[in-house]
Image (tube, rainbow, N blue to C red):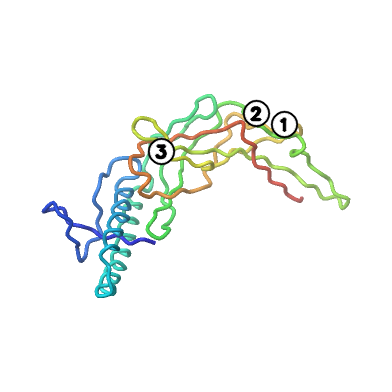
């Protein structure tokens, strides 16, 4: 993992600080200062790495390790401050309906990267027929009398948008909608709540993200969960 080194900007030149874990950058956007903090982390690591030689390796490496720990603590503090923050979210209103605001949930740290998930109440706006193969929906009864049942879940993706609505990043899965297995077809019934199940990293690539969009690709094959009962 790269290590973050802060530089003072008071005199408009890059001066290495001996002890500072704060971040430089904008606090706007969905994820506050975190992307700028990590962007500085990556930039200043490369600059410090270029200065290492056989005479100063130990000294600079020690300082980098200290600043790495300070940066992790800084990002974690920033992430905790965002916990519960309401974020702008859009949906295709023919598919989904937001009934309660969507908020950020700080889950954990992965080294210096903050991991977030989402909370809130989002439901299916109407019945959604899924692209399910009837052969995959078939349940079985074994000779022992036990049954193999098939549960169907429709994945919901997420897009991270800039101020102009352009997609900066996307992930295929942020949650799932439970569907009814009708034997020959599968349908997510209107009002079915979205289960937010998965988290995502917030790093320097998230700088400039101003809103989120939840998406369903109905051409995508749903997930099948087979259980022995």
Q: Is residue 49 above or below residue 149?
A: below
Q: Earlier in the sequence, mark 3 or mark 2?
A: 2
Answer few, some or many: residues within 10 Å of disc 3's Cα (few below 14, many 20 plus, some between 14 and 19). some
Which label was assigned to residue 168? 3
Does 156 sit left or right of 23 as displayed? Answer: right
Q: Are marks 1 and 3 in contact (CB under 8 Å)?
A: no
Q: Are marks 2 and 1 in contact (CB under 8 Å)?
A: yes
Answer few, some or many: residues within 10 Å of disc 2's Cα (few below 14, many 20 plus, some between 14 and 19). some
Circle nearer the viewer, 1 or 3: 3
**Residue 199 location in percent, x, y?**
48, 48
Which label was assigned to residue 129? 2
Quarter of the image with the N terminus is bottom left
**Residue 123 location in percent, x, y?**
53, 33
Answer few, some or many: residues within 10 Å of disc 1's Cα (few below 14, many 20 plus, some between 14 and 19). some
- Residue name at image x 71 percent, y 36 percent: 181
- Residue name at image x 17 percent, y 59 percent: 15
Q: For this rendering, which residue is in front, 42 or 156? A: 42
Does 62 sit left or right of 201 as displayed? Answer: left
Q: Earlier in the sequence, mark 1 or mark 3?
A: 3
Q: Quadrant of residue 51?
A: bottom left
- Residue name at image x 69 percent, y 42 percent: 151
- The residue carrying mark 1 is 185
Which label was assigned to residue 95? none
SS at mark 3? Answer: strand
Q: CA distance from mark 1 to mark 3?
A: 35 Å
């Amino acid at each position: 993992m790269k290590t973050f080194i802060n530089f003072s900007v008071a005199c408009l030149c890059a001066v290495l600080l001996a002890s500072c874990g704060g971040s430089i950058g904008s606090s706007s956007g969905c994820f506050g200062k975190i992307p700028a903090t990590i962007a500085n982390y990556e930039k200043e690591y490369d600059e410090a790495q270029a200065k290492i030689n056989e005479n100063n390796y130990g000294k600079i490496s020690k300082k980098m390790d200290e600043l790495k720990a300070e940066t992790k603590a800084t990002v974690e503090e920033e992430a905790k401050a965002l916990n519960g923050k309401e974020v702008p979210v859009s949906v295709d209103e023919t598919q989904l309906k937001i009934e309660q605001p969507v908020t950020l949930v700080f889950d954990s740290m992965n080294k210096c990267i903050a991991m977030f998930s989402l909370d809130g109440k989002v439901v299916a706006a109407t019945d959604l027929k899924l692209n399910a193969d009837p052969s995959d929906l078939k349940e079985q009864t074994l000779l022992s009398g036990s049954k193999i049942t098939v549960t169907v879940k429709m994945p919901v993706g997420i897009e991270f948008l800039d101020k102009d609505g352009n997609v900066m990043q996307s992930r295929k899965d942020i949650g799932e909608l439970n569907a009814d297995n009708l034997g020959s077809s599968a349908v997510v019934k209107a009002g079915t709540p979205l289960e937010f199940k998965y988290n995502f990293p917030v790093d320097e690539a998230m700088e400039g993200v101003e809103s989120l969009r939840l998406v369903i690709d109905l051409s995508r094959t749903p997930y099948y969960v087979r259980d022995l009962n």
